[in-house]
Structures are given as C-alpha cells and as structure tokens.
Image (cartoon, helix red, strand yellow):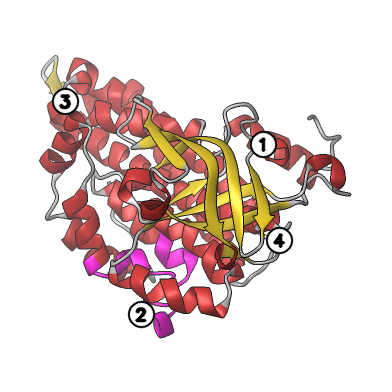
Amino acid sequence: MPLPQTDDPYQDLREAMRGLCGDYPDEYHRRIDMERSYPEAFVDALTKAGWLAALIPEEFGGSGLGLAEASVVMEEINRSGGNAGACHGQMYNMGTLLRHGSDAQKRAYLPRIASGELRLQSMAVTEPTTGTDTTKLKTRAVRRGDHYLITGQKVWISRVQHSDLMILLARTTPLDEVKKRSEGMSIFLVDLHAALGNGMEIRPIANMVNHETNEVFFDELVIPAENLIGEEGQGLRYILDGLNAERTLIAAECIGDGYWFVDRATGYANDRIVFDRPIGRNQGVQFPIAESYIELKAADLMRFRACELFDAHKPCGAEANMAKYLAAKASWEAGNACLQTYGGFGFAHEYDVERKFRETRLYQVAPISTNLILSYIAEHVLGLPRSF
C-alpha cells in the first residue's frame, strides 16, 4: 500500500512514531492480547518519549501540539499493529482539564501527567440504567462544606486499574430542579488511589477485546470541593466538548487500523498463489481492498477537518461525529476484506488479523454507536425532528 505522500506535514512525526512502535512488534501485542494484560512497557515508552503529553502546553512540560498531531500519534499506534485503546484516554481526557480546569488545577496536575508521574487515563460517564441517555444519569454529588459526597454506579469504565486520576460526571442538581435537562451535572477529578476502598469499588468486566474495563460503585465517596472542574452544573457541556476530541481521536485509530488491514491484505494477495497465480489478480479479491482504501482516504479527510476546527476552538460536533462514523465503518469493512483475503489463515493468532478484527469492531458501538451519530446528524445538521 502506498505510504503517505512526501508532502505530508506530519511525516516526521509519523517516522518518529514508527521508530518507537517498531520496538514493539506484532509478537508483543499478540502476547499482551492473549494474556489479557496491559502493555505497560509500551505505554511507558510512549510516555517517556512525550507522545502522551502531546496536548499539554509547553509551560506545563508537554509538547503543546494540537489535536491533529495527537490524532497522528493514535493513528500510527494502530497502524503499527498496536492498540491505542490502552492509552488514548489520556489524550482526550486532557481536553477537559486543559479547557475547563482552574490555573491551580493545571499547575498541580499537568506537569506530573506530562512527566509520567501521574496517568489520567479514565473517564466515568456511562451508567448501566441510562447508557447514552446521559442527562438521566443517577450518580449524585452532594455538597457538604468543603467536599462532595458521591453515590452511584458507572459501567464500561476503562483503564481504572492503570490510571491515577479519573474524570467523573455526576449530577449536583436533581433533574426535576433544572430548567434544561443538560444542566445540573458537574465534573470532578478523582484521585483513584485515595478513592479505592474508601467509598469506591471496582469490578472488572471480561470482554471480547483486551480493554481493561470495569463497573465502578460509589458509596458516599468523599471528593474535595477543589476537585470540581469548572462551574458546578455545567459538566455535561464540558464533557461534550471533550467528546469531540475523543471521537476524532477514535476516528484516527480506526484509520490506522484500516490502513493496517489494507496493507496486510495487499501483501497477502500479492504473495498467496492459488491455481498457479496470485489471488490478488482476481477482481473479487482486488475490489474490496481497493474500496476499503478509498473509504479510508475519505475518512482521513474528515478526521483532519474535525481536527482543524477543534484546534481553532470552533464548533466541530458534526465533523467529529462524521469522522468517527466514516472511519469506524471503513476500518470494519477493511477488516472484513482482510479476513476474507486471508481465508482460514485469518483466524490464526499468528497473523494478527483476528485480533485487529476484534479490536476495530468495537468502534461500531463505542464510544458512541453509529445509530446515535446518525441521529445527531439528522437532528443537528439536517433539521429533522428529534427521534428520542
């Protein structure tokens, strides 16, 4: 498959990432997946090289880069055969603290996150009884003097066991007391080490892919009032701003997956000889791979458009959602084409196709399902009636 054009403004960044990722080949990621363990060595290497501090301003020890550069970092991890799901939380969670945290919070946490002393890998929003109907979340935060008491439950909360800090969304004003249902929720920064066993309990969820994810239970967890991020009651707005970054970064990861699938399928189709000729000579093999490549290139353009708007602090909800939709769809179809090209060998662990196939399938569902993206575009872009 053709490499990026030589006029790619991110070529130096890509080459640096490929150099680091090259130290962690397929065998490493395959072993981590089969053991259902966490890629500590890989994440530590990314941290020490400064890549997970890409979005942190230089004054706080980071690289001061934009979402576009951060997205390339995520893309190249997946394109190398890795899984950025182990560390992407730090990228998009950073936006909440960067854009809405106080100066004191930034000074207290950002330098330590940039150095790797602290990890901000986890965000707790989703609940078992409300799912994506976030305005009806039931986790409560009640002010008591200089602290809040948190009670409730979250589900599908990733990387809690490999993070030091967590972004938590909880309702501070009951739903029936607010003028708009999007109001009355607030964001808190949780010290996970202090919380665990002192009002917070976690229960791991075994799942299809190697994403360390959990149920989280809160029983009057004490959080200092100084850990409130931004203004009380405006947390959902802050979260939605961060979700645009999340969806754009996930789009980049899907694009990385898609290019990995196209590259592997192309190589195998050229090398695999059946009936005395390479199977890639058959249009039935060629066309799905070519179609996947075309769709990936289109998704790539929308990814960078979303990054451009986000970095300019302009509205980008539609573009972020469309980028995620296009990229997740393209990577899934590329995965199908790759698995079909490999045939039976695609199901063997040693070729890594089945692992990447499972990993990229997740993004049809999370962090937002394709149906909800379609609903968003229908309502907010096309002006159709709200469907829920």
Give yes or no for contact between labels 1 and 3 (Cβ–Cβ under 8 Å): no
Bin the neighbour count of mark 4 within 10 Å (Cα to Cα): few under 14, some 14-19, many 20 and up.
some
* Residue that label 4 marks: 232
- Camera-side residue: 10 or 158? 158
Q: Quadrant of the C terminus?
A: top right
Disc on the earlier residue, 2 or 1:
2
Residue at horizontal 18 percent and vertical 38 percent from the top:
32
Disc on the earlier residue, 1 or 4:
1
* Residue that label 1 marks: 138
C-alpha span from label 2 to label 1: 37 Å
Vertical placement of residue 169 versus 216, above or below: below
Q: Can you tell which of label 2 and label 1 is closer to the viewer?
A: 1
Identify which amino acid the numbered label 1 is placed on.
Lys
* Residue that label 3 marks: 349
Q: Can you tell which of label 4 and label 3 is closer to the viewer?
A: 4
Which range is magenta?
Answer: 48-71
Question: Is 56 contained in the magenta span?
Answer: yes
Disc on the earlier residue, 1 or 3:
1
Identify which amino acid the numbered label 4 is placed on.
Glu
- Camera-side residue: 362 or 236? 236
Residue 64 seen in this snapshot: yes
- Judged left or right of residue 388, residue 95 is left
Question: Is 24 contained in the magenta span?
Answer: no
Vertical placement of residue 81 versus 67, above or below: above
